[in-house]
Structure formats: structure tokens, C-alpha cells
Image: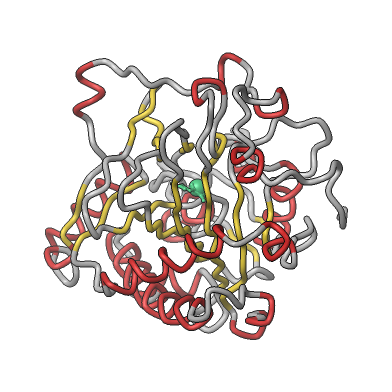
Amino acid sequence: MATCWPEPIVSVQSLSQTGVPTVPNRYVKPAHQRPVFNTTQSDAEMEIPVLDMDDVWGKPEGLRLVRSACEEWGFFQMVNHGVNHSLMESVRGAWREFFELPLDEKRKYANSPDTYEGYGSRLGVVKDAKLDWSDYFFLNYLPSSIRSPSKWPSQPPKIRELIEEYGEEVRTLCERLIETLSESLGLEPNHLMKALGGENKVGASLRTNFYPKCPQPQLTLGLSSHSDPGGITILLPDEKVAGLQVRRGDGWITVKSVPNALIVNIGDQIQILSNGIYKSVEHQVIVNSGMERVSLAFFYNPRSDIPIGPIEELVTENRPALYKQIRYDEYRSLIRQKGPCGKNQVDSLLLSR
Ligand code: OGA
Ligand code: NI
């Protein structure tokens, strides 16, 4: 796999700070990919489900709510999720401070496409690709053997501790969610975790996304349409600025985040394991001219070196296996070359019938 980027990296935040009046051509999306802002009245009223996790954990009715959210939307917001609210605020605040550091300081962590770890401004290594209006910091969290805190930012002073504290709470939440997803699919509580490789072998990573102000938000995207490649994603959105859009039919729903909520979405590997019962739904991020936006995406993924395919119990005569098996390391390396590409990657595993 390539070890360098095909073109010199430009920090979008620095570009935005120069006050460019127009979006450079590298970021101008073809007309059919540009964002849609003016939804019809009925679309504007649509919302992804909001689940109070106190009504979900250990409750049969809760399992039905989870099942219908994962079948129909692939996304839901969680309140009473158990992650400390002031920790959420502090870790997001610390990342905001990181992005406010001078470019030279951030560049010390400049990443390369072989692991993506560090500070970066592009996903994918396709030469001449249209780029997204964002910068990010990516780090490995699990298994702890691949965690390298020395590659994590050292400024602001508390950021490493905050990442770990937040990581531990979100990891616990993910373990609980995987158990709930398993039961909601009619499986034993530990079945899905076993299929992911077991809680000591699963992978997790954190990507903090920074979306700078954009002079022409109608021409570009903060993050192009994609589905998340892994197991589940826990998103801590910006507390003030909306931007996440979720695919609904031919259109997009802009998520209005509930105060202190976390957003969870199903990734491609759970779509595969559930034999297509749960949907890994396309999403994208729009930007705006007035406010920058910060979000933290915690990706909880299968163990990378075992085959992932539809769970046997979910394959029946009426519902034959939809996908061929693939190891997550192989899947991820394909995604890392191409960058965000809608649902093309998971669709490429569909078995023809
Ligand atoms: C992602 C993602 C959404 C957001 O990082 O994969 O979809 O709101 N982020 O930043
Ligand atoms: Ni995503």
C-alpha cells in the first residue's frame, strides 16, 4: 500500500483562515453530489429515532425499539447512555483547543495513508480526487497493544488523559450495545461479540473531525457520502452546530442533535454479520459559512484478522447469505485507498443469486 499522499497536503483550516472568498476547485463537488439544504416540509419534520437507554437496557420493549431503528434507519440518538456529560464536553473542548494550535505544532503529527494515525486532511489516495472540507486527527485505541499515546497530541495538557477516560467510557457503552444488538437480532447476548472476535480482540479508533468555516458551502461537503466500514460508530456531535446528514430514500435528513446525546450508527461489518437485517446507512456532513464544527467519531470494529460473514443463525432458506466473507484488515485497506465512496464497498461483497 502507498506510504505517501499523491499530492501535497493542504490544511483546510489554514485555507479557511486565509479568508479565501471562493472554494478552490479541488473541493468543488460535481453537481449531483452537492448538498441539498432546502428539504420539503415533510422531510424537515423527519428525525432519526431518539432512544432513552434507561428504557432499552434489559427491557424486551427496548430490544424492539433498537431493532426497528437499526432495520429502518441504521442510526439513533441515545440519551441516558451512561457516558459522563462533563467528560464529553471536556474532551470535545480539548480537541477544539488542539485544532486552534499553530499549524506547525499540529504538523508534528502529520499522518500518512499506511496507518492514517495522526493529523490529516484527506481520506483516500486517489490522485486528483475531489477533496472534503475538513481536517481530522485519527488515533488507534483498541486493542491496547496497538495504542501509541506518544503519537497522541501532547497539547493541550490534559488531552491524553481525557482521550483515555472518554475512550474507556465509550468502550463500555459499545460492549453493552453489542450485547443489546445481539439480543435484538434474536441471538444469545454474547453471540455478536464472539463473532466480532471477542471483547479483548476487537479494534477501536477515534477520529476527531474539524470542519472549518466555508465560503461556499453549497459547492462542497465536510465529509462525502459514505457508510462507516466497521462495527458500530459512536458520534459525539458538536454541541451547537449541525452538519450530519443521514440518507433517507433519495434525500437527506439533517440530524438535530439532542443536548448531551450520543449518536450511534451501524457500520458495514454489522450489516454483513446480520445478513443485511441491520443497515449501514449512508451519511455525509455539510459545512457552513458562519461556524466551524467539531465531532468525535469512535469506531468499534471487529478483530481484524478473522473472516467476517453472515452469522449462521441469520441465514435461512428464505434469507440466504447475502455477503461473502472478508477479513476486516482487507476491507479497511480497500476503504483507505478509495476514501469515502457511498456504499460501494459493502455492495461489492454481495453474492449474486
Ligand atoms: C465519520 C462521520 C460525522 C460527523 O467520521 O465517519 O460520519 O458528524 N462523521 O462528523
Ligand atoms: Ni461516518
Residue sitting nearer the eye, 229 or 158? 158
Residue at x 60% of width, y 41% of height = 17
The quadrant the C terminus occupies is: top right
Residue sitting nearer the eye, 233 or 156? 156
Tell me residue 65's x, y (percent).
19, 52
Q: Is residue 347 visible?
A: no
Tell me residue 182's x, y (percent).
35, 65
Residue at x 36% of width, y 55% of height = 264
Query: Is 279 situated above or below 179?
Result: above
Q: Is residue 206 visible?
A: yes
Q: Is residue 121 left or right of residue 203?
A: right
Residue sitting nearer the eye, 43 or 133? 133
Query: Is 157 situated above or below 263?
Result: below
Residue at x 80% of width, y 38% of height = 126
Tell me residue 245's x, y (percent).
40, 35
Asked where in the image residue 145 lies, by quadrant, the reply is: bottom right
Query: Is 332 situated above or below 339?
Result: below
The quadrant the N terminus occupies is: bottom right
Tell me residue 328's x, y (percent).
65, 61
Asked where in the image residue 226 lies, by quadrant, the reply is: top right
Residue at x 81% of width, y 30% of height = 128
Could you tell me how many numbered marks the image carries?
A: 0
